[in-house]
Amino acid sequence: PDSQSRSSQLYARAKHSLPGGNTRTTVFMKPYPIYAASGAGCRVVDVDGVSRIDCINNFTALIHGHGQPEVVAAACAQIARGTSFGMPTEAEIELAELLCARVASIEAVRFTNSGTEAVMMAIKAARAFTGKRKIAKVEGAYHGSYDYAETSLDATPANWGEGSPLSVPYAQGTPQGVLDDVVVLPFNDIEATEALLRTHAASLAGVLVDPVPNRVGLIPASEAYLAALRRLTTELGMLLIIDEVITLRLASGGAQSRYGVVPDLTTVGKIMGGGFPVGAVGGRAEVMAVFDPSTGRPAVPHGGTFSANPVTMAAGLTAMRLLDEAAHARLNAQGDRLRDMIRAAFANAGLPGQATGVGSLIKVHFHARPIRDYRSAFPTAEEQGLLSRLVLELLNRGVITASYGLIALSSAMDDADIATIGAAFDDALRAIAASAS
Ligand code: PMP
């Protein structure tokens, strides 16, 4: 910390107009956040002139890193032609066609401005389609900030109790009615999940699941778990909603293509906007018809002043076209390489730890316990402290990761960049081990 730094000064100023100086909880950092000045490729320069490798890429959104020239050109050209209209544009059709072509379960698409809204619209669609009101989700899984979707996000050993997961509220003031309408599932536990779905079948509209949930430990759902969810939702008259807001980066057909599951609805966001705000819900045409206004008032009206704005559409289309099969394969291979390097770094430092994740998504844990769900991934206070220390040690070695140990690679990184990140881990973990002994 340096009270003379420009970041520190900006933070002092921010406190006068933003609560706690902050407008996005996820980027808060003590004693003050590092303010970004610019980014190019895989590097970000902060307002004090320090350049670092960006391993978080705006929480997984910037799959091509910063300022990818073709994405910038597409966005700038569209900005000059108009940033948004009270009319549809051709670009929304093109991006919808791309999604329908790539993700087998998606036959029709609605665009939103964020993943939060995409999840919200998917839940509303499930309710309208089934005529039921409850939604089931996995304990601890993050799906944005719709009241129903954020339930149980804050479960801790102090409040999660014995047995079935509880509808623990995230924001204070969450209405009891919301909590009553959320069924919280234990991840990867087929037996317990089946029992819960059967118990609530008469009122459950759908099951919302992220196939590689970040906050659950970034371990994949077992194929058997996803297959069970597909079988049970069909049998019990519920929709299966797969949240691919983060995992769309794992394969051109999404994580669902990797794990062989066909949902009714899919939510996406992040990478699909080329760095601009975006979200979308897509799925079976029969279900997506709840949004169709062409034959009268739709079952679920959905607007949004900036939904499908042409700047997002143009940048997103360019970014997605650049993300071809070869780019996916390269990103996933680099993720595997870095995961191996991090595992080796833990071993070299003699510290217990593991690197989970799939492809270009990696998460670091300061324990070697087997992870199968939220509870088994949950860090002790000491492990959480070590993780915070690691994030700081990495920052000081020129590597930016998320405060909770998440890494998302970009196609702007070459093999030398991956080696640099691996070396920073090795050095940081040795420093932590040295000060602990
Ligand atoms: N779903 C998942 C799986 C996410 O990770 C996120 C955001 N990190 C969201 C939904 C919400 O997306 P947004 O931040 O664009 O609202």
Image: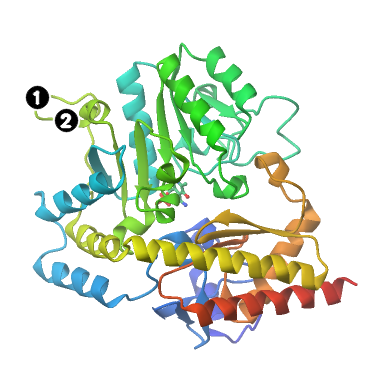
Q: Amino acid at mark 1?
A: Thr
Task: Sort mark 1 into few (<14), some (14-19) or many (20+) by Cα contacts within 10 Å.
Answer: few
Residue 133 in view here: no
Of 144 and 99, the residue lying toward us? 99
Q: Secondary structure at mark 2?
A: loop
Screen quadrant of the N terminus: bottom right
Q: Secondary structure at mark 1?
A: loop
| Vertical side of 128 occupied by 257: above or below | below
Residue type beneath disc 2: Asp
Q: Is residue 429 above or below residue 24?
A: below
Nearer to us in this view, 322 or 381: 322
Residue 295, disc: 1
Query: Which residue lies at the image location 71% right of the left edge and 76% below the top edge?
Result: 426
Ligand 1 within 8 Å of the CB at mark 2: no
Q: Is residue 216 left or right of residue 82?
A: right
User: Do the residues under discs 2 and 1 have CB atoms within 8 angstroms?
Assistant: yes
Instruction: Say the numbered circle drawn on residue 292.
Output: 2
* Residue at mark 2 to residue at mark 1: CA–CA distance: 7 Å
Residue 272, by quadrant, is bottom left
Q: Residue furthest right?
A: 437
Q: Find residue 232 and report its horizontal and vertical position in percent.
A: 48, 20
Please name the residue shown 25% across and 28% down the image: 300
